[in-house]
Amino acid sequence: MTENPPKKGPMTPGVPDYAALYRADLQGDFYGPDYYRPPASDIDSAIIYDDGEDKRATAAFLSLCFGPRRALEAGCAMGLLVKALRGWGVEADGFDFSRWCVENAHPAAKAWVRWGDVLDLAPPGRPYDLVLALDILEHVPPDSVPRMLANLAAALEPGGLLFTVVPAYGPNGFGPELYPLAYEEWRRDAAAGLPFRNIPLDDRGRPHLGHLTHATISWWEAAFARAGLRRLGGAEKVLHEKFDAAFEYPRRSFFLFVKAGRFGGHGTERRLLKRIEAVPGLPRGFFEWERWGDMWVRWTRAEARDVVEVRGRSRLSLRAACHHPDIAGRPVTVEFAVRDGGAESVESRDHGWRDIDLALPRREFAVLDIKVSRTWCPEPDVPDIRRRDLGAALSYF
C-alpha cells in the first residue's frame, strides 16, 4: 500500500463534518476496486496495493526486528501483509472495514482476514504482542482518534508493541521530517495544538485518499500517550538508521509504541535495541510467499540472501525444489552457504524436493546466501516489471 504526501489541490473550507464523511462517504464503497488501482493524477484517491517488494520487506523487517509471536493488522485490506507474516511463522490475523477487501482477500490469507471496524474493536480473547496500523489511523475523524487508539491498546498484551505508519507532519526528534508543514493554515493549527481543519480533497471533492486526520507528530504522540502507549523514540532512531533505505518514501513515516506498564516500557526498549542491533539486514532476492498445501514457500531469483533467527539451534533444515521445464536434460545446481557456518550444493534433475542441512553459527541471526545456476520464467510474455525469473523454491522446517 503506497500513499504519497498530499499535493496542493482543492481543500475543505472551514471545518468539515468528519463524522458524516467517515460513515457515509468513506465506509461504504470508497475502499473498493476504484481505490485499489494505479492513481490517474496526484489528487486521485487511489493507491497501488500489490504483492511486491514493499510487503516482503515490511514482513521481514517486522519479524526480524520485533520477533512477534502473534500479530494483528488493523486495516489489512486484502491481507497481503498477513500472508507474508504467516510465511515468517508469525500467527498473524487481520481485519478491515471494507467488505470488498475482505471478500477479495488473497486466497492464502483468507482464513485469517475478517471484517471489522477499528472504532468498534472488542478486546481479543488472547491479546497480541504486536499490533500493526499501517496507513489507517489518518482515515478516522480527529474526534474518533482517542477511541481508536484505546481499542488498539486493548488488543495488546502488557509490554506489547504497536507499530504504525501515519503521515504525521513537522519536525521528528527520532527520524526524518517527511511531511513538512507546507501551508500557512496548517502552521496556525499546529501552533494551536489542533489537527488541521482544512484537509486536501481529491479530484471528485472527497477527502484525498480518505484521509480525515492531518496533524503534527507531537499531536499524534500526545494522543498515543493518553491511550497508555509510550513512544520508543530510541528504537525508532536506530530503525531509521538501519532500514530506511529498504522502504519506499511513505513507509519511512513509521512510529513505534509500547503498551507501557508499571515501569513505562523501558526494559522493553532495552531488549528491543539489543535485538535490532543484531539484525544483519533484510532478505533480498525473493519473490512473494506462496501457500503450497501445509507449507509456506518462496521462490528465489538467481541469487538471494536470507536472514535466519538462530534461536539456539545448531542446524538449519530446509527443502529446495527447481521447476525448470527442461531440467531433465539440463540439470540445475543450487548452492547454499551460511556465513561462518555450513555450505552445501545440490543438483536437481527433476522437480522433486531436496533436503538441505546446514550448520549455524553461534549468534542471534545467521545469513544464508543462495545461488542458482540458471532461472526460468513461467510467463515469458509478461512485461519485465511483472516478470518473475525463478530460481529455486525454498521451504523451511
Image (spheres, helix red, strand yellow):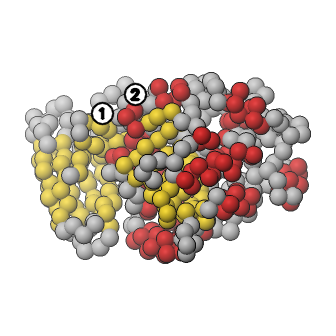
Is residue 273 visible in the rendered image? The answer is: no
Q: Amino acid at mark 2?
A: Val
Classify 10 Å Cα crowding around label 1: few (below 14), some (14-19), many (20 and above): some
Q: Nearer the viewer, residue 137 or 373?
A: 137
Q: Nearer the viewer, residue 361 or 224?
A: 224
Q: On the rendered structure, is 245 left or right of 277?
A: right
Q: Are marks 1 and 2 in contact (CB under 8 Å)?
A: yes
The image shows residue 165 at horizontal and vertical percentages of: 59, 51
Res 181 quadrant in image: bottom right
The image shows residue 385 at horizontal and vertical percentages of: 45, 35
Location of residue 157 with respect to 50 vertically, above or below: below
The image shows residue 161 at horizontal and vertical percentages of: 51, 60
Disc marking residue 382: 2
Q: Nearer the viewer, residue 307 or 20?
A: 20
Which residue is painted at 71% across and 34% down in the image? 22
Classify 10 Å Cα crowding around label 2: few (below 14), some (14-19), many (20 and above): few
Which residue is painted at 19% across and 40% down in the image? 322
Res 108 quadrant in image: top left
Q: Quadrant of the N terminus?
A: top right
Location of residue 23 with respect to 371 vertically, above or below: above
Gap between marks 1 and 2, in whole Å? 9 Å
Which residue is painted at 66% across and 48% down in the image? 147
Q: Earlier in the sequence, mark 1 or mark 2?
A: 1
Disc marking residue 377: 1
The image shows residue 152 at horizontal and vertical percentages of: 57, 51
Is disc 2 placed on a helix, strand or loop? Answer: loop
